């Protein structure tokens, strides 16, 4: 019988010899995993950054004049809004940018637009604000979720408002034949109503005839061509590449490649999208474009946000640090707004950039070859 | 296990051999039942033997562990197999239905008794009509099936209404064949075996699952405690499984073996019963019945869900005696009958030998039909086959069928169902629709009442009244009193107003449709052939209603088109060109000129 006991004892010993090291190894791996998951923290003030709690989610960059105009309009002073829009003159992209600010206010409360239109029924700008506000309101009613998370009530309001917006846009275009903005506003309608490629190209021809390198029109049209709306990855990249290549010096359009890349990355989270060969060159081209535009350009914040994200993804931390510093405390922009929690997404990228940069010994950004 | 012969050869073989003798089958079932207890005993003996071996050796920690382990296993086995109560004795009386006495239905009884005589078996003591397209037999045999007991025959009402008499004979022959072969006497024994096994396996599985859940909960609690104390969470452990899990595996394997064996026997019994049916009604008729029953089942499902229960939510049922009886109306429809015939003629799905479940209680219908066809080919056409051509419906066997169907409802429907209001078939669709509209427009009318402080008028006046309020620009005051969706509640400013407009428009649409129903502009009619409810409306109605609704909820509101569409004395298309259509009770105005929607001349 002792033999049996011995065998059992030996078995127990062997079992222990196998399992104890294995369990210890497992425990070590689990601890390491937990440590990797634990949030990395830095002190934003030490780097001159805005703390997470004070980040402004509403806009891509600071624009005190826009805030003042919005407040005045909502208080009923439409003349200031009209003046603000008129001062953009024939810089069609600036006009489109300012229109966006007014439309944001008008989609919340349109009393001032009604007053404006009552006094000047033939003012093309008033008609334009009214039309684009309907488009924007339709988007608000629909919500930004995917179709399967959108209720039929939301879709009904969305389609009713878009049906109202289209004739309003056409009317505004009739009143200002040179202005591309009433046409650009229709890009969003084309998205919502699922216009065919032919119809969309006809619309695009109207826009490019009036302004071939309009920044806002291109970011809007990029949405149409990406896979989540009416296009595909290939169509989207082709559109971005064509626009970026044809852009004149001093245009920020090269950033479209990065925008397209980000759309691709969001759509295919499993694919190594950022590893594609053209990414570094696209970033460099965008950095060059940023250097050429005057400081305070109204599109710079958006471009810098995308650059910061891409540089972080490519581990070009020294350059990313520059962009994060430049964007400051406003984060209401792509790519962060695609996340359910934009502040978290932004702070994660920023913190890890600075931690990695610190680890590397705070290197200066490499000189760029022109 | 013996490889299963496939197809025709198998069917013939089975048909020739018939089922194994009753005593052999009884022995098998009994053996398996005893085997179950033997298996449990074996486990206990094995555990005890281990203990004995351990006791012989020197006393160490391992010995103690062995004792404890064996005790745990023994406890589990005993608890589950012996101590736990068996499943509650399922009522042996079968599904609820209506028992027919020989006095009430002499012809059916005489027919069944005649057939029983031809099969040379004792006729059933009870004939019970049950819902559905089923037929089955039961016998209250006692003492492991040694003492015969009361026999019961269950007949689905859908079979009585849907089968020709000759095919009903085939069904009855098949069921009586089960009596003749003593299948029903053994039924209880087999059921006891299955019940025992099922109970054991489910209990063991439940206990194993509970144990696992408890362990998980304990782990979660521990983690929470450690988190509260500020320590890192405990590291994950591989879950340990108790003896219940492994016992469940053993007993599941045994249960599978039993099922395979007993179901294989019961499939043979089906072939044997089919032979009896073929002797009674002819093989061709029996095959026809076999093919028709699945089609009838499908039709009965469709009938119940789409017709009989059409008004359920509105609290309405078809007239008395028609809840089941309406099936005959469905079958009387030419289109449906053609569909049914097509379904019954469709080639049966040929099951490959891999796709066949060894646990099915019946052989595939395709094999049964094939066996019967082979039989028909081999035997010369007998006198029976000529009788088949006379297609008397089986329902002619019944005395006062309406009475029987009404009694069947009383016997089988729930109290809730019996309390529902009965309306004639022709009225059922629109009455149901009206109730639905009434329920759906309630919030809107309540909003009107709250806003004006007086109860909203009923009928078409309600719409008039509401449109008056819209003309006064009160849309948003009304919409604010309607129930809000989650998204609408989150919105603000103009978006909130748009949500309110959308919600108001759908409520207004329901009220408009309700008004259209009440004024007779639109009709909802019962249709036995196609989709159960057919909506008929003037041709312009479908197009004009959305436009009129859009205008009514616009800012400022334009209510005239909706009024004209639904309430005007001269109703017609909004452009005012067309004559009022046929479905309107009032004669169209004589002066209206011919428009784009001319009245159709019967050709």
Image (cartoon, rainbow, N blue to C red):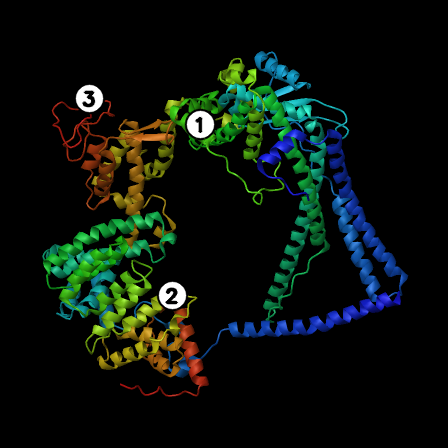
The reply to whether dot 1 and dot 3 touch (C-beta < 8 Å) is no
Tell me the number on the disc at residue A266: 2
The answer to whether B580 is drawn above or below residue B123 in the figure is below
Left or right placement of residue A214 versus residue B272 in this view: left
Horizontal and vertical percent for residue B32? 74, 40
Can residue A221 be seen in this snapshot?
Answer: yes
The residue pinned by badge 3 equals B587
The residue pinned by badge 1 equals B341
Horizontal and vertical percent for residue B445? 32, 36
Who's the residue at 55% across and 72% down the image? A33
**Closer to the camera in the image, A14 or A64:** A14
Q: Secondary structure at mark 3?
A: loop
Can residue B129 be seen in this snapshot?
Answer: no
**Closer to the camera in the image, B172 or B38:** B172
Q: Secondary structure at mark 1?
A: helix
Q: Which chain hosts label 2?
A: A
Horizontal and vertical percent for residue A166? 19, 53
Q: CA distance from mark 2 to mark 1?
A: 55 Å
The reply to whether dot 2 and dot 1 touch (C-beta < 8 Å) is no
């Amino acid at each position: 019988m002792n033999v049996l006991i011995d065998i059992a004892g030996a078995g127990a010993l062997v079992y222990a010899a196998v399992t104890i090291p294995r369990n210890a190894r497992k425990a070590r791996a689990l601890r390491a995993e937990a440590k990797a998951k634990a949030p990395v923290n830095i002190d934003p003030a030490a780097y001159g950054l805005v703390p997470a709690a004070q980040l402004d989610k509403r806009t891509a960059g600071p624009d005190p004049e826009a805030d003042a105009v919005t407040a005045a309009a909502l208080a009923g002073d439409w003349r200031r809004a009209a003046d603000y829009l008129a001062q953009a003159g024939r810089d069609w992209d600036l006009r489109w940018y300012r229109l966006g600010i007014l439309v944001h206010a008008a989609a919340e409360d349109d009393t001032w637009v009604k007053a404006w239109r009552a006094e000047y029924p033939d003012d093309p700008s008033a008609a334009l604000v009214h039309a684009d506000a309907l488009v924007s309101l339709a988007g608000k009613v629909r919500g930004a979720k995917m179709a399967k998370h959108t209720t039929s009530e939301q879709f009904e309001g969305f389609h009713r408002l878009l049906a109202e917006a289209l004739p309003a846009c056409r009317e505004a275009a009739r009143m200002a034949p040179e202005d591309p903005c009433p046409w650009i506003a229709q890009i969003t309608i084309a998205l919502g109503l699922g216009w065919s490629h032919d119809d969309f190209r006809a619309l695009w021809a109207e826009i490019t005839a009036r302004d071939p390198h309009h920044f806002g029109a291109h970011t809007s049209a990029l949405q149409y061509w990406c896979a989540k709306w009416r296009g595909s990855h290939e169509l989207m990249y082709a559109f971005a590449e064509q626009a970026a290549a044809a852009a004149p010096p001093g245009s920020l359009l090269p950033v479209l490649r990065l925008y397209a890349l980000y759309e691709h990355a969001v759509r295919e989270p499993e694919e190594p999208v950022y590893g594609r060969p053209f990414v570094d060159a696209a970033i460099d081209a965008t950095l060059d474009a940023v250097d050429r535009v005057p400081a305070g350009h109204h599109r710079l914040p958006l471009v810098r946000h995308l650059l910061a994200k891409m540089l972080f993804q490519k581990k070009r931390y020294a350059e990313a640090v520059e962009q994060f510093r430049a964007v400051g405390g406003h984060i209401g922009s792509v790519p962060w707004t695609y996340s359910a929690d934009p502040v978290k997404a932004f702070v994660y990228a920023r913190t890890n950039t600075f931690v990695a940069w610190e680890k590397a010994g705070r290197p200066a950004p490499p000189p760029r070859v022109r | 296990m013996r490889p299963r012969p496939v197809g025709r050869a198998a069917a013939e073989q089975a048909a020739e051999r018939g089922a194994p003798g009753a005593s052999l089958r009884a022995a098998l079932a009994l053996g398996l039942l005893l085997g179950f207890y033997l298996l449990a005993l074996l486990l206990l003996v094995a555990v005890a033997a281990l203990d004995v071996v351990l006791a012989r050796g020197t006393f160490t920690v391992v010995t103690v562990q062995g004792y404890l382990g064996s005790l745990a296993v023994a406890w589990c086995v005993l608890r589950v197999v012996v101590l736990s109560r068996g499943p509650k004795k399922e009522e042996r009386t079968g599904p609820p239905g209506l028992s027919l006495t020989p006095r009430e239905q002499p012809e059916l009884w005489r027919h069944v008794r005649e057939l029983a005589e031809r099969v040379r078996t004792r006729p059933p003591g009870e004939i019970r009509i049950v819902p559905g397209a089923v037929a089955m037999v039961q016998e209250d045999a006692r003492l492991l099936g040694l003492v015969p007991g009361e026999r019961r025959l269950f007949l689905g009402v859908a079979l009585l209404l849907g089968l020709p008499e000759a095919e009903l004979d085939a069904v009855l022959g098949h069921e009586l064949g089960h009596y003749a072969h003593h299948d029903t006497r053994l039924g209880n024994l087999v059921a006891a075996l299955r019940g025992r096994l099922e109970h054991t396996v489910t209990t063991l599985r439940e206990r194993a699952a509970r144990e696992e859940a408890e362990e998980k909960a304990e782990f979660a609690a521990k983690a929470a405690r450690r988190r509260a104390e500020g320590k890192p969470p405990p590291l994950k452990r591989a879950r340990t499984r108790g003896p219940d899990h492994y016992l469940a595996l053993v007993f599941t394997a045994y249960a599978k073996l039993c099922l395979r064996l007993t179901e294989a026997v019961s499939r043979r019994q089906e072939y044997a019963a089919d032979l009896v049916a073929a002797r009674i009604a002819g093989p061709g008729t029996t095959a026809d019945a076999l093919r028709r029953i699945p089609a009838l089942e499908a039709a009965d499902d469709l009938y119940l869900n789409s017709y009989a229960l059409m008004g359920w939510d509105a609290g309405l049922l078809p007239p008395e005696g028609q809840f089941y009886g309406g099936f005959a109306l469905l079958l009387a429809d030419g289109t449906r009958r053609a569909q049914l015939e097509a379904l019954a003629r469709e080639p049966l799905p040929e099951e490959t030998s891999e796709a066949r479940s060894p646990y099915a209680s019946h052989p595939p219908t395709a094999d049964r039909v094939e066996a019967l066809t082979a039989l028909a080919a081999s035997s010369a056409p007998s006198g029976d086959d000529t009788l088949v051509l006379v297609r008397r419906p089986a329902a002619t066997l019944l005395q006062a069928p309406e009475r029987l169907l009404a009694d069947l409802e009383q016997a089988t429907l729930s109290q809730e169902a019996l309390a529902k209001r009965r309306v004639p078939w022709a009225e059922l669709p629109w009455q149901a629709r009206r109730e639905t509209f009434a329920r759906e427009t309630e919030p809107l009318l309540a909003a009107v009442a709250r806003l004006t402080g007086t109860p909203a008028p009923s009928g078409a006046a309600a719409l008039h009244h509401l449109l008056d309020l819209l003309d006064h620009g009160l849309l948003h005051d009304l919409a604010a009193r309607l129930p809000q969706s989650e998204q609408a509640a989150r919105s603000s400013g103009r978006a909130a107003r748009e949500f309110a407009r959308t919600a108001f428009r759908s409520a207004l649409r329901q009220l408009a449709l309700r008004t259209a129903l009440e004024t007779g502009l639109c009709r909802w009619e019962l249709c036995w052939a196609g989709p159960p409810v057919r909506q008929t409306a003037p041709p312009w109605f479908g197009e004009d209603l959305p436009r009129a609704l859009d205008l009514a909820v616009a800012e400022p509101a334009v209510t005239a088109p909706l009024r004209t569409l639904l309430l005007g004395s001269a109703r017609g298309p909004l452009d005012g060109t067309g004559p009022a259509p046929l479905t309107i009770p009032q004669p169209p105005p004589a002066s209206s000129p011919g428009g784009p929607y001319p009245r159709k001349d019967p050709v």
